[in-house]
Image (tube, rainbow, N blue to C red):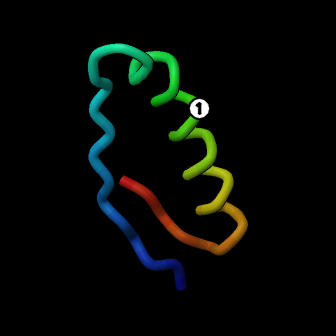
Amino acid sequence: MSKTYKIAAIPGDGIGREVLPEGIRVLQAAAARWDLSLE
């Protein structure tokens, strides 16, 4: 049974707009690896 986490991802000024999509990809990969669910 996986545990569900609610995560807010808000792009900021500067590099946030470029970094945020990659950060989300990392979170998705980690969630898949450790059987977690992200909302």
Q: Is residue 19 above or below residue 28?
A: above
Residue position for label 1:
22
Q: Residues within 10 Å of mark 1 (few under 14, many from 20)?
A: few
Residue 7 in the image: x percent, y percent? 32, 53
User: Which kind of residue does numbered mark 1 sit on?
Assistant: Glu
Where is residue 32, by image quadrant?
bottom right
Residue found farthest to the right: 33
Q: Is residue 9 left or right of residue 27?
A: left
Residue at image position (39%, 70%) is 4
Residue 12 vs 26, above or below: the answer is above
User: Vertically, is 33 above or below 14?
Assistant: below
**SS under mark 1:** helix
- Residue farthest to the bottom, as pictured: 1
Q: Nearer the viewer, residue 27 or 1?
A: 27
Residue 6 location (% of width, % of height): 30, 59
How many dots with numbers? 1
Q: Is residue 33 left or right of residue 37?
A: right
| Quarter placement of the N terminus | bottom right
Whole-percent x and y of residue 16?
A: 39, 23
Could you tell me which residue is drawn at 28 percent across and 23 percent down?
12
Residue 27 pos. (x, y %): 55, 52
Viewer-nearest residue: 13 or 26: 13
Please give the name of the residue rendered at 28% of the width and 16% of the height, measured from the top-left corner. Answer: 13
